[in-house]
Image (cartoon, grey):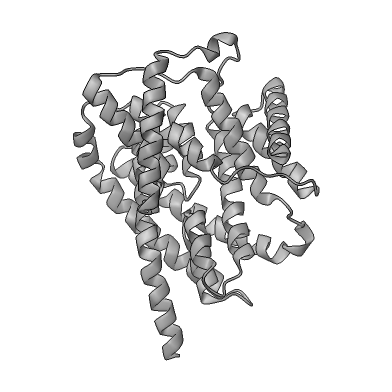
Amino acid sequence: MWLIIRTLFIGVCGAFLAHLVGLPSAWLVGALISVVVVAISGIKVAMPKSTSSMVSLFLGISVALNIEADLIDQLIYWGQSAVLMYGMMAALLAVTYRYYARLPGWKMNEALFCAVPGNLAIMLAMAQDTNANVRRIALTHSVRLLFLVFLVPLFLPLAEREVTLRGFYIEHPEQMIATVFLAVILGWILGKVRVPAAMLVGGITATLILKLSFGWHWKFPEMMLLTLLVFLGCAIGSRFDGLVLREVIPELKAAMGGLIITLIISGSFAAILHYWNDIPWTQAMLAYAPGGMEVMVAIAMNQEVDALFVATHQMFRMLTMSMVIPVLMYWLDKKRTLT
């Protein structure tokens, strides 16, 4: 417990310092940098495994609060961009798998797990049941996530919110409590049946049910959203706990190579979406970003883009990869057996 409190204290101090010096997206980036620096310096940091799920829950609720009545029409219109995204994921898997598989000492299943855009928790759960190097897989995904979380907010800064006592005011607290309660229940149920991004989906679903049934309209207090960003930065930064840089230099080099390939492919497809469907460039990039779903949704909510578009595409990506990877694992095992 004290370790978690210490990690949060480090993150809050880093976030506040970043806010004072005027760093873009200070509350997210400041917390992230401070926790990563402390982690790789040898000081132990940790956050509860449920942190990302809770952040996803509140982000899902926030996204749904901004959904308008033409949702169905929007989903139909997004069909083309979803198809294009599946093409992007196929290209990502094919190219990055070949890249990792050709590296000395890498097994085929490790190359596949590392090639998947996002879905780290699911990839690690699958890797535990194989002979794959779990640390290698976690590090490769974490490098990509750290890059996205650190760099994207610098180019697309989150709207800086004023830190005042007014920021703690809760509009319609009874509606907020009821929505969060229902969202937790739905998220827990969806998690039990292994639905990807269960808490995010639960938050969106619960909010829509209550919003459409009772006409509820409320907003989270400003300071709660800032708190979510700090928690998210601490959670991602704590993944680097215990990392000794000199021991993982080969994995870091491999991860950087895979990151460059991933950025080129995802950026190219985002550009196609931008020009083909006349989708704003920021919105296209956030929707097609390979991982860091919570961060991409958080940034979208603070930009003049459709956060639901971003959240929907990120969920489609997670759901699709969760269904495709077991099939590819079976294919790899069969291929290895035949050879």
Residue 154 drawn at (x, y percent): 59, 34
- Compared across the picture, whether 81 is left or right of 284 comes to left
Q: Residue furthest bottom?
A: 339
**Total number of numbered discs in the rendering:** 0
Quadrant where the image shows the C terminus: bottom left
Quadrant where the image shows the N terminus: top right
Q: Is residue 136 above or below residue 80?
A: below
- Compared across the picture, whether 281 is left or right of 54 comes to left
- Compared across the picture, whether 242 is left or right of 206 comes to right
Q: Is residue 182 above or below residue 107?
A: above
Q: Which residue is drawn at 73% across and 34% down?
A: 10
Q: Which residue lies furthest to the top in this view?
A: 166
Toward the viewer: 293 or 147?
293
Is residue 52 something that shows in the picture? yes
Is residue 159 something that shows in the picture? no
- Compared across the picture, whether 67 is left or right of 35 comes to left
Residue 199 drawn at (x, y percent): 42, 41
Residue 235 drawn at (x, y percent): 61, 42
Q: Which residue is drawn at 46% across and 14% down?
A: 170
Residue 330 drawn at (x, y percent): 39, 76
Q: Which residue is drawn at 41% across and 23% down?
A: 177
